[in-house]
Image (cartoon, rainbow, N blue to C red):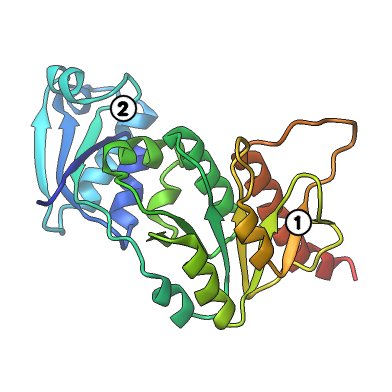
Amino acid sequence: MTTSIVIEGKISVNAVLQSKYRKVLTLFYDVAKLQRKRKSKPEKSVKQILESVKSKEIKIEAVDQNWFETHANGKTHGGIAAIVSERIYQKIFEFLNSKSGIYFFLDGIEDPFNLGYTIRSLYAAGIDGIVMKQRNWCEVEAIIIKSSAGTSELIPIALVEDLESTIDIFKSNNYTIACTDKDKGLSIYQSKLKAPLFIVIGGEKRGTNRTFLDKADLILTIPYKREFNGALSLNSAATIIGFEILRQQYYTKLNK
């Protein structure tokens, strides 16, 4: 059975309109807002979205504020929402058939807001794709889209049943397998983080599974400035590593 999802806000709607991974089926806008003589910047943005989809096969419906109060999750919808199709996730072979890249596996992440924030950071850092454990994400996809500022719709994401076999597949395709470990490993600032690279980020509660650490070619640690026995959140660790990769790829070249 095909599942449709309600998303809201111009950033989320614009992202799905640009996405290769799902479609906007019906677009809803607050007709009263667009009929105002003096339009604010957000209302002009809604008008621009409506103009941009006129040539596409997308149903457009003018609704009132009651519709948004019934269907929207909050007050930040800005007078625009959409019903969108279920997302098409990538297969691992699609990653491997493209040019050698850098991919992150986010292990143990459950909270959709944290997932969205993490995807946003990795997208901004230029990471090529994300791998996650197979589960039903449909119920929280609207939250992921919004918290990622739409970037979850623009970056390739693959869902896998078994991480161990996924690591083996990447390894057999000459990828360096890197895992994070809080206590033992090489500092990310002393490591060469370049493609082809598959990075497993462990959750802050359980850390990285010992089986994955045993399979790793490279164990990474993020050094702390002061004595601290706690672990960084998955979002923080992924962001720091993602931007260290960006620094090594581009900014070290500029300083040579």
Q: Residues within 10 Å of mark 1 (few under 14, many from 20)?
A: many
- Quarter the C terminus occupies: bottom right
Seen at 66% across and 54% down, the residue is 242
Residue 196 to residue 204: above or below: below
- Residue at disc 1, secondary structure: strand
The answer to whether residue 45 of the structure is visible from this angle is: no
- Residue at disc 2, secondary structure: loop
The location of residue 146, given as percent across then percent down, is 39, 37
Residue 220 to residue 169: above or below: above
Residue 185 to residue 170: above or below: above
* Residue type at the position of mark 2: Gly
Does residue 14 appear to the left or right of 177 in the view shown?
left
Q: Residues within 10 Å of mark 2 (few under 14, many from 20)?
A: some
Mark toward the start of the polypeptide (2 vs 1) = 2
Location of mark 2 (residue)? 78
Does residue 156 appear to the left or right of 222 in the view shown?
left
Foreground: 213 or 104? 213
Image quadrant in which you'd find residue 220: bottom right
* Residue type at the position of mark 1: Leu
Location of mark 1 (residue)? 220
Does residue 28 appear to the left or right of 224 in the view shown?
left
Q: How far apart are the alpha carbons under marks 2 and 1?
A: 42 Å
Residue 185: give its label: none
The location of residue 116, given as percent across then percent down, is 47, 41
Residue 153 to residue 20: above or below: above
The location of residue 165, given as percent across then percent down, is 48, 69
Foreground: 96 or 65? 96
Seen at 40% across and 75% down, the residue is 94
In front: label 2 or label 1:
1
The answer to whether residue 56 of the structure is visible from this angle is: yes
